[in-house]
Image (cartoon, helix red, strand yellow):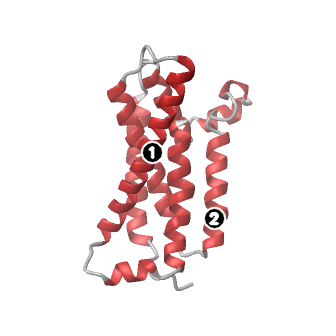
Amino acid sequence: MVGVTAANVGLMGMSIHVAENRGQGVLKRYRLSPMPSWAYFMAQFVTALIVLVVSIAALACITILLYGPPTRVNVPVFILVSLISLYVTLSFGLLLGGLPLPVRSVQVVSAAVFFLAFFASGAALPRDSFPGWLHRVSDFNPLTIINESLMNSYADRPVAWISVFVLVGATFIVNLITLRTFDWEGNH
């Protein structure tokens, strides 16, 4: 649920929020202010982090009430992977939200990307039930890597760090693309 929450906040919530801000002219005003561009992105990350922390706390409380305290969580790794999941999903959300598209188009695209990632990650249906080709393709789904890493850290099993580091590297490239293509003006 943590990975899905991060994906929801990052992919859908952030992309739509950014597109709405651009459509209302808020981003244009930010761009004209003395505030550096990175401060806007950092503020979005901190806001999303607060939402994710509150969500994790609520999930933890409900889980502990229903099932008792977990016995084998690797807490530092779980926190690290949770932060990575937010970084990845928020980065993709900022890329989608920064595209020079109308708000409605961003809503459609972000929902499509979220649901494709969600259903192909094993979060909705077990990946073991996927046909062979879909199982292989889903290995490259960022949400699959995030969810499996979160589940492994929750069960104190080894995390596939190579996949996580490749995902972080790919996300860094997404950040560079976002910085070059981000539409502050909204002139479409």
- The answer to whether 176 appears left or right of 188 in the picture is left
Marks 2 and 1, how far apart at CA: 21 Å
Image position, residue 60 (x, y; %): 47, 30
| Residue 110 image offset from top left, x and y in percent | 61, 59
The structure residue drawn at horizontal position 60% and vertical position 72%, both measured from the top left corner, is: 103
Q: Secondary structure at mark 1?
A: helix
Marking on residue 107: 2
Q: Image quadrant of residue 41?
A: bottom left
Is 115 above or below relative to 105? above
Residue at horizontal 67%, vertical 63%?
108
> Which amino acid, mark 2?
Gln
Instruction: Give neighbour class at mark 1: few <14, some 14-19, many 20+ (Cα, 10 Å).
Output: many
- The quadrant the C terminus occupies is bottom right
- Disc 2 versus disc 1: nearer the observer: 1
Query: Dot 2: few (<14), some (14–19), or many (≥20) neighbours within 10 Å?
Result: many
Mark 2 element type:
helix
The answer to whether residue 160 shows anywhere in this view is yes
Amino acid type of the residue tagged 1 in the rendering: Leu
Mark 2 vs 1, N-terminal side: 1
The residue shown at (35%, 80%) is 31
| Residue 88 percent coordinates (x, y) | 44, 48
Q: Are marks 2 and 1 in contact (CB under 8 Å)?
A: no
Residue at image position (54%, 29%) is 62
The image shows residue 12, relative to residue 139, as above or below, that is below
Location of residue 94 with respect to 146 vertically, above or below: below
- Residue 167, given in percent of the width and then of the height, sits at 43, 43
6 displayed left or right of 53: right
Q: The N terminus lies in which quarter of the figure?
A: top right
Q: Is residue 170 visible?
A: no
Q: Which residue is mark 1?
A: 52
